Amino acid sequence: MKSLLLSCALAAGTLGLFTGCAVDVPYSQTALNALQTREFDYAFDPTFDATVGALFDLGYTIRTSDKRGGFLSAVSQNGMVQIKLDQAGPKRTSVRVSTGFSGQTRVNIERIDEILNTIDRRLTTSNIPRNQ
């Protein structure tokens, strides 16, 4: 009986490995902030515009856009994102990206990095000088 239970447990564990079952990693609030947030040396308006462009570049459909409040939400086949932009200074903007899938908030580090890197690429390849 023990060997049957052990076999079943091993089979279930192996199946979980091959089906790509997601495991939520518990992050401290400090670690989560570090993963989700990046500051850009650009004013709020060009950073917001670059964020909208980055979402389109990555195949997202924007569901909510509130430039005045600094909030965007978007969806794609890969899940949903919520982005909060805050003016961190006269020529500096903080961008925080939260990800989710199937209506559940899930930290997807690769997706967050992809979005933040695309925003950075759009800003650095634009005609807007840094600190503008």
Image (cartoon, helix red, strand yellow):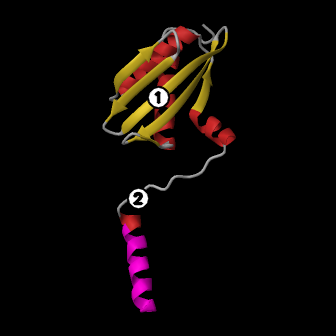
Three-letter code, disc 1: Gln
**Residue 69: image location, x then y, percent:** 53, 13
Asked if the residue at tag 2 contacts the one at tag 1, i.e. Cβ–Cβ closer than 8 Å, the answer is no
* In the rendered image, the vertical position of residue 44 relative to residue 100, given as above or below: above
Q: What residue is shown with label 2?
A: 21
Q: Nearer the viewer, residue 13 or 120?
A: 13
Q: To which quarter of the image does residue 60 belong?
A: top left
Residue holding disc 1: 82
Q: Earlier in the sequence, mark 1 or mark 2?
A: 2
* Amino acid type, residue under disc 2 in the picture: Cys
Magenta span includes 95: no
Q: Is residue 9 magenta?
A: yes
In the rendered image, the quadrant that contains the N terminus is bottom left
Question: Where does the magenta region start and end?
Answer: 1-15
Is 93 on the left-hand or right-hand side of 100?
A: right
Image coords of residue 73 (percent x, y) = 42, 25
Alpha carbons under labels 1 and 2: distance apart? 23 Å
Relative to residue 91, is residue 125 drawn left or right?
left
User: In the drawing, does residue 19 fall left or right of residue 25?
Assistant: left
Type of secondary structure dominating the magenta stretch: helix
Question: Is the C terminus in the top left, top right, bottom left or bottom right quadrant?
Answer: top right
Q: Is residue 12 visible?
A: yes
Nearer the observer, 87 or 123: 87
State the residue at coordinates (51%, 29%): 116
